[in-house]
Image (spheres, rainbow, N blue to C red):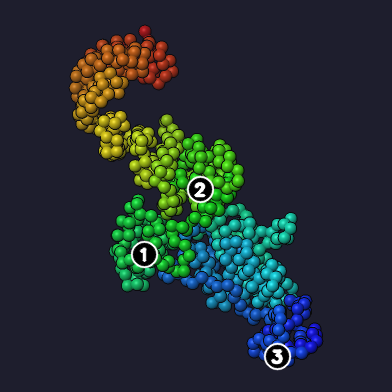
């Protein structure tokens, strides 16, 4: 190209010549630039830098072509190895060249929750493959969006394929095409690492897209390998040619070894028992262990002191972060999952993932029954606290169906924020304890109180009246325990939630009378502290405590406790309150159980007229009192009187409750019993 009267400028090799010429660039991206003649300003030749002619005006820089980089060649920076890096079983799985059927593994996907060490495992694999000379080309790309992947591919295209740097999309296409094996061409052993794939949709092609969007998945090649790390579990990431490797937590041994090595490197030692306990309390999460070790080193605190801080519910996770994060980490533990939660909230049904996680963060990390999180109480919570995801504010008022609640769980599972296993409905949802802690840290005290009451309502709704499934009952008890540990005070505002009493009943009904006694002792103490000694909930807890004390074998202690309770019940409620009458009947019962059958019979005989007067002849409590009177008459030696009393009671029970009511059947059985005891026909269940 000639520009007259400006002199000459010529570029040699990879250097740059600058002219005053403005117009189309000579040649194209894949051809050598010809020399450019610029006349009238003197000649300039570039042989070791940039040459500028004497032309004054707008300058256009023309790049000379570059030869393809020689192999081996790396694009992108592999993250540095973490201090005290632990070799793990997942690393061995990554290095396996073939799957179980003998087929070469071309693509592997490391998936798992944030903080388990996926990037470190990928970096270790890539570094080892590079150092061992097994690669000709290595590309490490951050895949948090489509743009950084395109940029990495474009850089590789420029450096390896002489692609035009001014057109990154075309350069990326050129590189992807270059990766595909071609007949007669020298094989290239390549590894592409796409780290932290945030959205699987960023990698796929959309043929109908006006921008002609293309797939960013590297092509299948007998000489190439692709490795992804991601928190996502979407089906689109896995398939026939993509092997999924689930990255879990450290084992207890790995956790202890990591903490020991990290501290030892700084001249610190801690008791093995303290480190083992700390690792368990951090849930064996590698990210948490790394930041805890850094905190201990920076602060000089002991592991025991750190554990005390961690156990304090007033301490937030952000308060336990070191001032400088270790191992080039970009995110403190407290914020490690915030982007994942944001992303989950955009998945259908939009806006439900976050409020669902709020509930799950208050329950048992090791297994929440699905019926709890899909109950009417839980769905009302989801509808009321749906995250606004669009311009239509009325969407927040839309009722949430049970299938939508399940889909919210699936959205959280897809981002590895929970493990959702519908095949085990009684423990369908598992959440790491630090994800729970970080989620609770985002809630205000008022929100925690409100959501705690909602979680308690959901537990009560899922609790069967008759506990036929012992596994379900055990899990419901574990979830109630967890709720009380996390936000116990909320369960006593404005009153003691019924789930606390349900927990004690479930313990006792499962045969754990001593555990039920311990539970109701705690409940009595706590209601007294929060609500006062005369609150109805405190009196109810004392009643349950006395009952289960008796059931555990201490009838005399139960009688003494009920006698004390009766005095307070009369003072607070009055003589004729139904609960006072029930307390009188229970006092008679435990006196009888402790050996004073005659005294029990006399007390119930004295009680019956008051019950009839207050409640009426047909009230269930009246029928129960009559039954108790007959029982203690028989126990005190008046067997015939007991049989007669039950015979008189049975027609009234049938009339009030019906022939098939359980109490009717019990009354018939008791009539047969006392008739048998008095010498009547054995097994006579007639009503005459």
**Is residue 571 rendered to the left or right of residue 75?**
left
Figure quadrant of residue 74: bottom right
User: Residue at point 24% right, 14% down?
Assistant: 605
Gap in Å between the C-alphas at discs 2 and 3? 64 Å
SS at mark 1?
helix
Q: Is residue 223 visible?
A: no
Label 3 crowd (10 A; few <14 / some 14-19 / many >=20): some
User: Residue at point 47% right, 39% down?
Assistant: 372
Query: Circle 1 is placed at which residue position?
Result: 295
SS at mark 2?
helix
Q: Which mark is residue 590?
A: none
User: Residue at point 65% right, 63% down?
Assistant: 217
Q: Closer to the N terminus: mark 2 or mark 1?
A: 1
Residue 452, percent across and down? 41, 41
User: Residue at point 64% right, 60% down?
Assistant: 203
Figure quadrant of residue 87: bottom left
Query: Circle 3 is placed at which residue position?
Result: 45
Nearer to me, 285 or 55 = 55
Residue 535, percent across and down? 29, 31
Nearer to me, 85 or 616 = 616
């Amino acid at each position: 190209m000639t520009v007259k009267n400006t002199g000459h400028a010529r570029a040699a090799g990879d250097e740059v010549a600058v002219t005053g010429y403005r117009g189309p660039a000579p040649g194209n991206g894949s051809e050598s630039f010809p020399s450019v003649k610029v006349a009238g300003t003197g000649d300039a030749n570039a042989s070791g830098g940039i040459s500028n002619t004497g032309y004054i005006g707008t300058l256009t820089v023309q790049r000379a072509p570059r030869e393809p980089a020689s192999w081996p060649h790396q694009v992108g920076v592999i993250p540095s190895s973490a201090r005290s890096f632990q070799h793990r079983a997942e690393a061995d799985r990554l290095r396996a060249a073939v799957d179980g059927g003998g087929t070469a593994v071309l693509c592997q996907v490391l998936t798992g929750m944030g903080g388990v060490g996926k990037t470190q495992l990928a970096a270790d694999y890539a570094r080892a493959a590079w150092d061992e000379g097994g690669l000709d080309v290595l590309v490490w790309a951050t895949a948090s969006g489509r743009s950084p992947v395109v940029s990495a591919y474009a850089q590789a295209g420029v450096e390896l394929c002489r692609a035009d740097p001014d057109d990154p999309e075309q350069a990326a296409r050129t590189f992807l095409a270059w990766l595909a094996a071609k007949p007669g061409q020298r094989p290239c052993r390549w590894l592409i690492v796409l780290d932290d794939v945030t959205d699987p949709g960023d990698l796929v092609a959309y043929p109908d897209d006006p921008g002609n969007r293309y797939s960013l998945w590297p092509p299948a090649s007998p000489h190439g390998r692709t490795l992804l790390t991601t928190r996502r579990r979407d089906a689109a990431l896995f398939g026939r040619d993509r092997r999924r490797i689930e990255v879990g937590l450290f084992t207890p041994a790995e956790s202890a070894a990591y903490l020991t090595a990290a501290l030892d490197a700084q001249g610190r030692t801690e008791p093995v028992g303290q480190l083992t306990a700390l690792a368990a309390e951090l849930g064996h999460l590698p990210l948490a262990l790394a930041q805890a070790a850094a905190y201990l080193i920076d602060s000089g605190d002991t592991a025991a002191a750190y554990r005390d801080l961690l156990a304090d519910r007033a301490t937030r996770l952000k308060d336990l972060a070191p001032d400088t994060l270790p191992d080039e980490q970009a995110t403190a533990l407290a914020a490690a999952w915030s982007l994942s939660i944001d992303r989950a909230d955009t998945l259908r049904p939009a806006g439900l993932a976050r409020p669902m996680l709020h509930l799950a963060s208050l329950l048992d990390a090791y297994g929440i029954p699905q019926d709890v999180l899909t109950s009417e109480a839980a769905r009302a919570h989801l509808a009321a606290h749906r995250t606004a995801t669009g311009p239509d504010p009325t969407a927040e008022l839309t009722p949430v169906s049970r299938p939508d609640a399940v889909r919210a769980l699936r959205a959280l599972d897809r981002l590895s924020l929970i493990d959702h296993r519908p095949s085990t409905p009684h423990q369908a949802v598992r959440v790491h304890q630090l994800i729970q802690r970080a989620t609770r840290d985002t809630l205000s005290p008022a929100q925690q109180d409100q959501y705690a009451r909602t979680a308690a309502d959901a537990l009560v709704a899922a609790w069967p009246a008759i506990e036929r499934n012992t596994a379900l009952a055990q899990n419901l008890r574990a979830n109630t325990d967890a709720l009380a540990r996390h936000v116990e005070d909320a369960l006593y505002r404005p009153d003691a939630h019924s789930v606390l009493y349900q927990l004690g009943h479930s313990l006792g009904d499962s045969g754990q009378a001593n555990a039920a006694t311990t539970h109701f002792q705690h409940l009595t103490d706590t209601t007294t502290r929060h609500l006062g000694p005369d609150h109805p909930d405190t009196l109810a807890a004392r009643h349950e405590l006395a009952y289960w004390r008796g059931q555990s074998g201490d009838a005399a202690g139960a009688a003494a406790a009920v006698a004390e309770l009766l005095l307070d019940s009369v003072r607070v409620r009055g003589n004729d309150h139904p609960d006072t009458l029930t307390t009188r009947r229970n006092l008679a019962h435990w006196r009888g159980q402790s050996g004073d059958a005659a005294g029990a019979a006399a007390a119930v005989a004295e009680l019956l007229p008051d019950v009839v007067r207050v409640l009426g002849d047909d009230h269930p409590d009246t029928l129960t009192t009559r039954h108790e009177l007959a029982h203690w008459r028989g126990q005190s030696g008046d067997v015939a009187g007991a049989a007669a009393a039950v015979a008189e009671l049975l027609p009234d029970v049938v009339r009030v409750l019906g022939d098939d009511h359980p109490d009717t059947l019990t009354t018939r059985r008791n009539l047969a019993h006392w008739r048998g005891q008095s010498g009547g026909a054995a097994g006579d269940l007639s009503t005459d």
